[in-house]
């Protein structure tokens, strides 16, 4: 019988070197909670930004801090009043307590859904952040069949889901990404547009690809792309950014992301789309919990296509 758990911790803001794995008491489920034995937990750029202190004004940290939102695993214990799940159930979901990078964590039942059997642990455990963000971003610009929508960082973790959702909405999608991603984008019904440091040249490429105009723009990279969308004549209410909040406020664009779609209903819908093959979802690499710093080193290179996933209890 396991009596203890292990979890990623950091005691101060800093680089990857501040991360360590600590022995902790086994979590106890409170009312309406279950303890999940975590089989897989995705890592995300936002977690690195929280750890460095870059987001301290938005997401303040108390130390020692845990980390991690995405998770999938097996219910190990149930708290008072829980009827939705039983011990042994396979689930996926999210933690708002920065606690999923651990062997075990307590999670409210309204942040979990049943894991479709077709999903691997690695996919299920890295789905929440990118799925909720992509869902919210697409919903925010209200794509209609036949409209043209441009997407920056179109082949990244969020972008690869955004462009696929737009295609499912029967939009014409212009995917701004590096040349190495052109084949993947074309294979998923997206028109690849090579990014570059010269935004005027990029604007020309976009206009050439959409001579009748672009109806909406989803920015997943930064403020220059929000300004580009405005310069292209796109109405601010049909521009959404998940990263350039200050610029969005200046021009009147939207900033809808994971917070606007963090519901079990959205997660279940997205998990079903991936499980049935309607959406492709790629895992680039997996790491044991002890190599969490290595996992973030790979993430922070920003060249990975697909999710990077921790396996806190070993490969299952």
Image (spheres, rainbow, N blue to C red):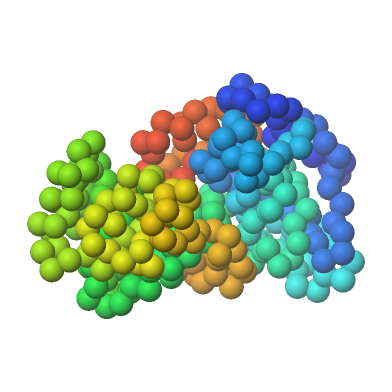
- At 56% from the left and 65% from the top, the residue drawn is 260
Q: Nearer the viewer, residue 49 or 90?
A: 49
Q: Is residue 303 above or below residue 214?
A: above
- At 58% from the left and 26% from the top, the residue drawn is 16
Farthest residue to the top: give it: 17
Quadrant (top left/top right/bottom left/bottom right) for the N terminus: top right
Task: Give the x, y percent position of residue 118.
Answer: 50, 63
Is residue 50 at least partly visible in the picture? Answer: yes
Q: Is residue 250 left or right of residue 16?
A: left
Q: Is residue 176 left or right of residue 241?
A: left
Q: Nearer the viewer, residue 268 or 254?
A: 254
Farthest residue to the right: give it: 80
- The image quadrant that residue 13 belongs to is top right
- The image quadrant that residue 288 belongs to is top right
Q: Nearer the viewer, residue 291 or 296?
A: 296
- At 10% from the left and 64% from the top, the residue drawn is 211
Q: Nearer the viewer, residue 262 or 255?
A: 255
Task: Give the x, y percent position of residue 82.
Answer: 82, 70
Q: Please give the count of numbered marks on the rendered protein.
A: 0
- At 59% from the left and 31% from the top, the residue drawn is 52
Task: Give the x, y percent position of residue 35.
Answer: 78, 55
Q: Is residue 116 above or below residue 316?
A: below
Q: Is residue 245 left or right of residue 69?
A: left
Task: Give the x, y percent position of residue 4.
Answer: 84, 39
Farthest residue to the bottom: give it: 145
Is residue 175 at least partly visible in the picture? Answer: no
Q: Is residue 31 above or below residue 157?
A: below
């Amino acid at each position: 019988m396991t009596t203890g758990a292990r979890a990623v911790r950091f005691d101060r803001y800093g680089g990857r070197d501040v991360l360590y794995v600590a022995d902790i008491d086994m979590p106890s489920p409170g009312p309406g909670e279950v303890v999940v034995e975590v089989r897989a937990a995705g890592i995300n750029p936002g977690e690195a930004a929280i750890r460095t202190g870059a987001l301290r004004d938005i997401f303040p940290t108390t130390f020692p801090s845990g980390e991690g939102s995405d998770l999938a695993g097996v219910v190990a214990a149930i708290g008072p009043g829980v009827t939705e799940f039983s011990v042994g159930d396979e689930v996926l979901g999210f933690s708002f307590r920065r606690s999923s990078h651990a062997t075990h964590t307590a999670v409210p039942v309204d942040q979990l859904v049943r894991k479709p059997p077709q999903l691997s642990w690695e996919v299920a455990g890295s789905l929440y952040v990118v799925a909720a963000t992509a869902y919210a971003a697409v919903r925010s610009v209200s794509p209609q069949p036949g409209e043209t929508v441009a997407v920056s960082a179109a082949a990244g973790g969020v972008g690869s889901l955004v462009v696929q959702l737009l295609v499912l909405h029967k939009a014409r999608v212009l995917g701004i990404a590096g040349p190495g991603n052109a084949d993947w984008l074309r294979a998923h019904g997206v028109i690849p547009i090579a990014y570059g440091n010269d935004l005027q040249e990029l604007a020309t490429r976009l206009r050439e690809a959409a001579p009748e105009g672009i109806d909406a723009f989803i920015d997943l990279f930064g403020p220059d792309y929000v300004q580009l969308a405005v310069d292209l004549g796109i109405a601010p209410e049909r521009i959404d950014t998940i990263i350039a909040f200050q610029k969005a406020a200046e021009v009147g664009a939207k900033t809808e992301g994971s917070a606007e779609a963090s519901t079990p209903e959205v997660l279940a819908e997205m998990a079903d789309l991936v499980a049935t093959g309607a959406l492709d979802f790629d895992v680039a690499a997996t790491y044991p919990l002890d190599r969490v710093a290595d996992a973030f080193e790979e993430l922070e290179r920003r060249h990975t296509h697909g999710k990077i996933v921790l396996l806190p209890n070993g490969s299952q």
